[in-house]
Structure formats: C-alpha cells, structure tokens
Image (cartoon, rainbow, N blue to C red):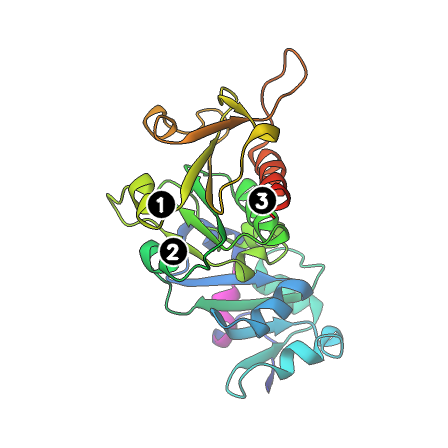
C-alpha cells in the first residue's frame, strides 16, 4: 500500500473527501464514499468495485491491515489525525474510516438477468426515493441471497453514502442494474423467464399461500403510492396479512418478510 500522511485539511490530494454531506447532495461523477470498517473490507474484496483511495485515522491502521493489504500498491492510503479528518469531512467521523470507490463496468439490466442461474430470485424496485429504505432493502437482499436487484429511473442511488452504510455494505455484495430509459420492467422480466410477484396491501394472494416459482422477481414500490396499477395488473399480487385497522409496513420490512418466504418456501 502507499501510505501518505495528511496534516493540512486543505491538502488537494484529499479533495474528494471534503464537505461530504454537501457533496452527497450534488453527486460525485461516478464515485462514491464508503464509510466504516465493514464497508471498507467489502470494498477491498470486491470484483465489481474498486477503491480509488482511502482516508483513515492512523490509529485504525493496524485493525484494517487485512483490507489495506488487499488494495493495489498504487492506491493511496491517506493518514490523518482525527481532528484533521473531521475538518476535511466537515463533521465528526467517529469511525475514522473513509474510502472513495468506483463501480467497474456496470451491466445493463438485460445483461445482468441473462447471467443469472436457472433457479433465481430477483428484487425489482420502483420509485424508492428514500436512502434509508434503499439501504435497508439491499441489506435484506444480501441477507436472503437475492441474485440481482433492478432499479427503475425514479429510484435513488444505492451508492449514496447513507444507503451504503444502512445496507452494511450489502450494496457492494448484491449485483444491481438500472433500467434503461423507456425499458419495460415486466417485459424484461418475462423475457428472462422470471415470474413477477408484486407486493401490495391489496394483493390478491396472502404471502403464505403463494406457490413460489423457481424463477421469481419480487416487485416493491415506494411507501405511500406503492406500485403503479398498470404494473400490478401484469403481476401475481401478494399481501402480508396484518392486524385489523392496519395495512402497511415499512417497505424494507415488508420486502424482508417476503424474501424470507420466497427463499424458504421455494427451497
């Protein structure tokens, strides 16, 4: 690894880390921020992502030795004391661990589906605009072994710093792809021989009674509006029965319940 001490928060070499929260709002031109020990370890081991650089408190170096040794020799590891690190980021970073990452050769949705195994489970997300929910959904996808996640154009970026953190790095372990502009989600799924199963409070089939197909795609929409009617009309719709007078769950919670059923009942 290439160790580079940083003593001045204005050092141009750490410019990508400066004022993280403000820059999260305007985008990073294909780069993303990874935060914390777990996420850095996943990034260092990933074949789909690469670490462009790392910025850590020197006191974390020994604990991160395995991850740092996996980085290419040309990847700079910047060492900044906590006060300098906080000044660079613009707020207190109690973890003291950051990295700038880049996604390698993101696949099209069609290419991602074409590479899936014969028995497979896909999660398709429509209009998920909340980064906490997006992170929770990817955490569930990773926990239940989802083979791929598809995102429509109205979804927020799963590589947003908070989404990666909430996912506990699940965004870096579960393959995902964006739908192209104008691409029809249901047609895409059907062409890949995937049966679309849509979550809805008004779903016709209780989740526990669903016969799980060997190639399934679970669809979920944003809290409130849910999935569009035209999408629901082309899917098998399922619901999660609840106590009288209450008909909704957080989207990440409901997807977690549904993924557990699809994985266990279909195995």
At which x and y percent is residue 223? 50, 29
Q: Is residue 216 left or right of residue 63?
A: left
In this view of the protein, which residue sits in the foreground, 37 or 211? Answer: 211
Q: Which residue is mark 2?
A: 113
Residue located at (40% from left, 51% from top): 26
**Residue range corresponding to the magenta coloring:** 13-19
Near mark 2 (Cα within 10 A), the count class, few <14, some 14-19 or many ≥20, is many
| Distance between the alpha carbons at the discs numbered 2 and 1 | 8 Å
Mark 3 and mark 1 lie on one chain; the one further toward the N terminus is: 1
Residue located at (37% from left, 61% from top): 29
In this view of the protein, which residue sits in the foreground, 166 or 216? Answer: 216
Q: Residue 266 shows which numbered tag?
A: 3
Image marks 2 and 1: residues in contact by CB distance under 8 Å: yes
Q: Is residue 6 visible?
A: no
Helix, strand or loop status at disc 1: helix
Q: Is residue 239 visible?
A: yes
At which x and y percent is residue 104? 41, 70
Q: Which residue is mark 1?
A: 189
Which of the 4 quarters of the picture holds residue 2? bottom right
Residue 18 drawn in magenta: yes
Task: Specify the quadrant that holds the N terminus.
Answer: bottom right
């Amino acid at each position: 690894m290439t160790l580079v001490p940083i003593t001045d928060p204005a050092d141009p070499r750490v410019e990508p880390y400066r004022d993280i929260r403000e820059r999260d709002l305007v985008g990073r031109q294909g780069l993303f921020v990874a935060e914390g020990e777990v996420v850095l370890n996943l990034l260092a081991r990933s074949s789909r992502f690469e670490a462009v650089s790392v910025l850590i408190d020197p006191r974390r170096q020994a604990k991160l030795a395995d991850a740092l040794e996996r980085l290419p020799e040309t990847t700079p590891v910047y060492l900044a004391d906590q006060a300098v690190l906080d000044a660079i980021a613009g707020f207190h970073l109690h973890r003291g661990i950051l990295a700038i990452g880049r996604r390698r050769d993101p696949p099209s949705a069609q290419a991602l589906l074409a590479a899936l195994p014969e028995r497979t489970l896909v999660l398709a997300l429509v209009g998920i605009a909340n980064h906490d929910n997006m992170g929770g959904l990817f955490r569930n996808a990773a926990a239940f072994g989802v083979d791929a996640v598809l995102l429509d154009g109205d979804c927020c970026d799963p590589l947003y710093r908070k989404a990666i953190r909430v996912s506990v790095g699940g965004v870096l372990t579960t393959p995902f792809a964006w739908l192209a502009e104008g691409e029809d989600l249901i047609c895409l799924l059907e062409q890949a021989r995937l049966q679309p199963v849509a979550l809805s409070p008004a779903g016709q089939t209780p989740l526990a009674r669903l016969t799980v197909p060997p190639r399934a795609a679970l669809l979920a929409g944003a809290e409130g509006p849910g999935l569009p009617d035209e999408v629901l009309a082309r899917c098998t719709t399922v619901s999660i029965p609840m106590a009288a007078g209450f008909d909704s769950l957080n989207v990440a919670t409901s997807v977690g319940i549904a993924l557990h059923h699809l994985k266990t009942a279909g195995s």
